[in-house]
Image (cartoon, rainbow, N blue to C red):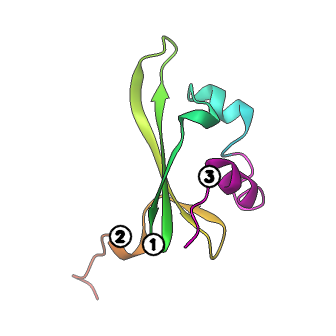
Amino acid sequence: MKRLTIYQIKEMTKDTAPYFFSRKTLRFFGQTMRDFKVTMMPPYYRIIAPRRDNEGNIDGFTVRYFDPSTNELLNTIPEFEITDNINN
């Protein structure tokens, strides 16, 4: 599995998540592309960046999982989603 940069992930998601890395979106959350860190979690890549308020203080984090097989950004990894087995 080849290590991808955040810039490569941005390019690969331009059709599936066209606004996620837009200047307007990044500015709203007080982020830059350099803020994003990419870690490999085969078969996914986790991307994480701090969110900042209007004063520049960190008030949370943006976390997504990139699936290179579909070029989609996921909120959670499918294997770790909590399911309701009561009605199944």
Q: Position of residue 55 (x, y in %)?
A: 48, 10
Q: Secondary structure at mark 2?
A: loop
Tell me the residue that label 2 is attached to. 81
Q: Which residue is mark 3?
A: 5
In percent of width and height, residue 21 lies at 68, 43
Q: Which residues are magenta?
A: 1-19
The alpha-carbon separation of the residues under discs 3 and 2 comes to 26 Å
Residue at x 55% of width, y 73% of height = 1
Counting other residues with Cα less than 10 Å from the Cα at mark 3, is it few (<14), some (14-19), or many (20 or more)? some
Residue type highlighted by circle 1: Pro
Question: Which secondary structure type mostly characterizes the magenta part of the structure?
Answer: loop
Local SS, label 3: loop
Left or right position of 49 against 21 = left
Residue at image x 66%, y 46%? 20
Measure the C-alpha gap from mark 3 to mark 1: 15 Å
Residue type at numbered disc 3: Thr
Q: Earlier in the sequence, mark 3 or mark 2?
A: 3
**Screen quadrant of the C terminus:** bottom left
**Residue that label 1 marks:** 42
Which amino acid type is shown beneath numbered disc 2? Glu
Instruction: Examine the rendered structure and indicate whether residue 23 appears above or below residue 69.
Output: above
**Is residue 9 in the magenta section?**
yes
